[in-house]
């Protein structure tokens, strides 16, 4: 029965996803217009649609593969990642994907649902959930672009706000705290059921914890630019009704289905599967896009992290199908046993630049005896790729986890805030342990043993100075957020860790057409200068007259 209900919800949301964007050619002017004259849409279904779009929208997810994974130097080597983000190529169509996807769909649905439930006492809880999720989606937008339409976004049909004002990011964050506090307080288990929730299945207590835990994240985000406000909001969130995440069962994860996937037109409107995982699998087995970047792989490998060969594997893909990882030949154990040089792709490089040194594979030699088309020396297979476990359509979509909350508590304690949860070191290691458990609990692995964890712990001290501890905390956050690329890039920019070198320092400076420094925001869609000229021009003027991706957003002062 549970599976039937889930399939019904997914199917309903997919239909709504198509409805909400079917009649609009201009994404901003059409915000919250009445797309199909369906004025009685169930707000629970609108929540479902927004939740699923987060990782289910193939068009939007491209922005992660093309830019964010390159900027955080976790993936590198496939054409998309290296060409756009790895070589700092400015492409407005690619940069605008989050903006042009979320505003006319998720923000539109959430704003409409909030408006129609705001005065209905029988819909108190769904109203609160919609408000919480709208804050979350808006945080993705503003963290990527900076100042953005917020207070008037989605009010085109409701209030004829076709050219919404660009709010200052500082004002947006101020309202985040107010909205999350108010929505969290409004949630009441005695009131209406939330029936369209594919994160917590309508658990009101979990939604309270989500609201408060997001407040921790946002408080830490502004901790350098507004330290007093940050401390106040962090401490208020900890004391708020419902509390924050206390174990991994609180993790906010969007549940997806392992559906049959292809890269045809239907893939762009079907939100039932995790398209981030499917996009990382790619549509060309001979050039699988999920090569690990040397920055990420070396941090794992050189520190002896027990997650190294859970995340990274070495495959021969010559026999793999275009729709699944079946027939992929895993050479990892042989490569480790033979002591073969591993060749992660450096920032700015394609996987074939330079072509890595191959080795004589006993496994491949055995296969070649019965299959003459198989080469026995497979050079590219010395490059670490993302493990099959991360390429499944039913992988969860990550919003925020218990592991992240522990790392936030550790840094807050380091700052001297009134956290009252233990020592910095204890919170740090609780976060690292939870991050390891997160991978094993959600990606089909056995639990990392206490012996392996304790060995890693013994060999990797958190550091002695406050700055060393901050670096350790945020380097672990960087690893944790591998499956949450928007939060990963935001936290790297906010914290300054890990310290990433430009691809120019790896010898690829001649290819960096968009500047040698790693970009710190993405540019607004060019069409904004036509559809919303007043707001766009004001935002550009505040940045000094140019829409430059090297201009820091408000909270990023590192």
Image (cartoon, rainbow, N blue to C red):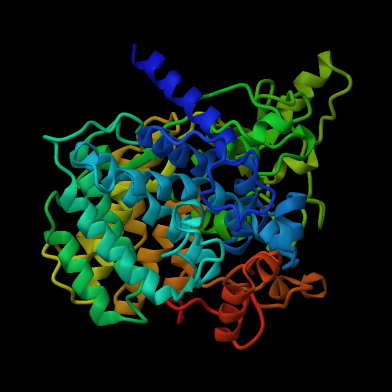
The N terminus lies in quadrant = top left
Position of residue 546 measured from the top left corner of the image (x, y, whole percent):
67, 82
Give the quarter of the image for residue 265. Answer: top right
Q: Which residue occupies 24% across, 62% down? A: 409
Position of residue 281 measured from the top left corner of the image (x, y, whole percent):
65, 36
Position of residue 528 measured from the top left corner of the image (x, y, whole percent):
65, 66
Q: Residue furthest top?
A: 1
Q: How many marks?
A: 0
Q: Can residue 2 be seen from the camera position used here? A: yes
Give the quarter of the image for residue 417. Answer: bottom left
Q: Which residue occupies 53% across, 24% down? A: 258
* 374 displayed left or right of 413: right
Position of residue 270 measured from the top left corner of the image (x, y, whole percent):
59, 31
Asked if residue 70 is positioned above or below residue 4 in the image, the reply reads: below
Asked if residue 537 is positioned above or below residue 380 in the image, the reply reads: below
Give the quarter of the image for residue 328. Answer: top right
Q: Residue furthest right?
A: 372
* 542 displayed left or right of 234: right
Q: Nearer the viewer, residue 372 or 401?
A: 401
Q: Which residue occupies 64% across, 38% down? A: 22
Q: Can residue 429 be seen from the camera position used here? A: no
Asked if residue 219 is positioned above or below residue 377 in the image, the reply reads: below
Q: Which residue occupies 43% across, 60% down? A: 139
Q: Nearer the viewer, residue 377 or 255?
A: 255
């Amino acid at each position: 029965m549970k599976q039937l209900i889930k399939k019904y919800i997914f199917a309903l949301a997919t239909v709504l996803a198509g409805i909400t964007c079917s009649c609009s050619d201009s994404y901003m002017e059409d915000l919250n217009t009445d797309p199909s004259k369906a004025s009685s849409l169930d707000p629970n279904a609108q929540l479902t649609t927004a939740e699923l779009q987060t990782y289910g929208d193939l068009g939007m997810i491209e922005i992660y593969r093309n830019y964010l994974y390159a900027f955080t130097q976790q993936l590198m080597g496939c054409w998309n990642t290296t060409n756009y983000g790895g070589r700092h190529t400015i492409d407005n169509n690619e940069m605008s994907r989050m903006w042009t996807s979320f505003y006319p769909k998720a923000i539109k649905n959430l704003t409409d649902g909030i408006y129609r439930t705001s005065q209905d006492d029988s819909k108190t809880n769904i109203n609160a959930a919609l408000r919480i999720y709208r804050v979350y989606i808006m945080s993705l937008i503003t963290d990527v672009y900076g100042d953005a339409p917020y207070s008037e976004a989605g009010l085109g049909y409701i209030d004829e706000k076709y050219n919404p004002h660009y709010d200052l990011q500082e004002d947006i964050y101020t309202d985040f705290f107010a909205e999350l506090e108010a929505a969290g307080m409004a949630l009441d288990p005695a009131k209406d059921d939330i029936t369209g929730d594919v994160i917590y299945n309508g658990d009101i207590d979990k939604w309270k914890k989500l609201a408060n835990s997001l407040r921790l994240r946002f408080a830490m985000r502004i901790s350098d630019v507004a330290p007093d406000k940050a401390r106040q909001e962090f401490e208020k969130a900890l004391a708020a009704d419902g509390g924050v995440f206390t174990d991994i069962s609180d993790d906010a994860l969007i549940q997806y289905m392992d559906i049959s996937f292809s890269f045809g037109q239907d893939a762009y409107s079907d939100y039932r599967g995790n398209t981030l995982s499917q996009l990382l699998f790619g549509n060309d087995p001979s050039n699988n896009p999920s090569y690990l970047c040397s920055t990420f792989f070396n941090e794992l490998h050189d520190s002896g992290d027990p997650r190294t060969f859970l995340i990274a594997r070495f495959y021969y893909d010559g026999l793999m199908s275009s729709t699944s990882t079946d027939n992929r030949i895993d050479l990892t154990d042989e490569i480790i046993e033979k002591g073969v040089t591993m060749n992660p792709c450096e920032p700015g490089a394609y996987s074939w630049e330079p072509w890595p040194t191959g080795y004589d594979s006993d496994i491949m030699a055995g296969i070649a005896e019965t299959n003459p088309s198989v080469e026995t020396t497979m050079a590219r297979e010395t490059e670490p790729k993302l493990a099959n476990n991360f390429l499944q359509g039913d992988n969860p979509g990550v919003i925020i986890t218990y592991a992240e909350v522990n790392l936030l508590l550790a840094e807050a304690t380091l700052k001297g805030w009134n956290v009252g949860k233990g020592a910095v070191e204890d919170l740090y290691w609780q976060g690292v342990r939870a991050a390891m458990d997160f991978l094993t609990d959600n990606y089909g692995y056995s639990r990392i043993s206490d012996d392996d964890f304790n060995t890693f712990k013994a060999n990797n001290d958190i550091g002695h100075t406050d700055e060393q501890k901050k670096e350790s905390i945020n380097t672990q956050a960087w690893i944790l957020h591998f499956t949450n690329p928007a939060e990963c890039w935001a936290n790297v920019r906010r914290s300054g860790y890990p310290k990433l070198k430009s691809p120019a320092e790896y010898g690829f400076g001649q290819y960096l057409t968009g500047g040698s420094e790693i970009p710190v925001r993405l540019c607004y869609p060019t069409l904004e200068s036509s559809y919303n000229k007043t707001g766009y021009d004001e935002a550009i003027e505040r940045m000094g007259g140019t829409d430059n991706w090297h201009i820091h957003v408000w909270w990023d002062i590192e």
